[in-house]
Amino acid sequence: MLEKVKNFLKEEDGMGTVEIILIIVVLISLVIIFKEQLTSLVETIFEKITRQANSI
């Protein structure tokens, strides 16, 4: 019994394909849901960078 517990704790299997696919689906869904807010944020950041670069 103790040997089985030790083997279980030593087991280092990587993530399965299903888990990776689920993570990708969640990330894509978040990007689709918040696309407008992300676009606005990125545009604001680039405008600020451009203004500050021009002042140097």
Image (tube, rainbow, N blue to C red):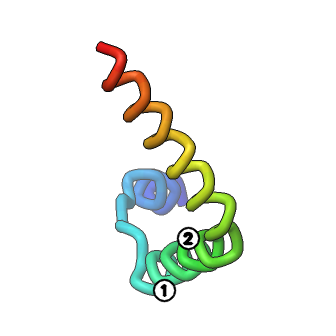
In the rendered image, the residue lying farthest to the front is: 55
Residue 48, how many percent across, how many down?
A: 49, 32
Residue 14, how many percent across, how many down?
A: 36, 67
Q: Label 1: how many residues lie within 10 Å, few (<14), some (14-19) or many (20+)?
A: few
Marks 1, 2: nearer the viewer = 2
Number of numbered callouts drawn: 2
Residue ID for mark 1: 18
Image quarter in which the C terminus is found: top left
Residue ID for mark 2: 27
At 59% from the left and 70% from the top, the residue drawn is 31
At 52% from the left and 56% from the top, the residue drawn is 5
Q: Nearer the viewer, residue 34 or 1?
A: 34
Q: Nearer the viewer, residue 31 or 53?
A: 53
At 60% from the left and 49% from the top, the residue drawn is 41
Residue 39, how many percent across, how many down?
A: 56, 61
Q: CA distance from mark 1 to mark 2?
A: 14 Å
Which amino acid, by three-letter code, is at mark 1? Val
In the rendered image, the residue lying farthest to the top is: 56
Q: Label 2: how many residues lie within 10 Å, few (<14), some (14-19) or many (20+)?
A: few
Residue 16, how many percent across, how many down?
A: 42, 79
**Secondary structure at numbered mark 1:** helix
At 54% from the left and 77% from the top, the residue drawn is 28
Is 21 above or below relative to 34? Answer: below
Asked if disc 1 and disc 2 are in contact, CB closer than 8 Å, the reply is no
Q: Nearer the viewer, residue 20 or 25?
A: 25
40 relative to 45 in the view: left or right: right
Which amino acid, by three-letter code, is at mark 2? Leu
Is 1 above or below relative to 47? Answer: below
56 relative to 48 in the view: left or right: left
**Secondary structure at numbered mark 2:** helix
Image quarter in which the N terminus is found: bottom right
Q: Earlier in the sequence, mark 1 or mark 2?
A: 1
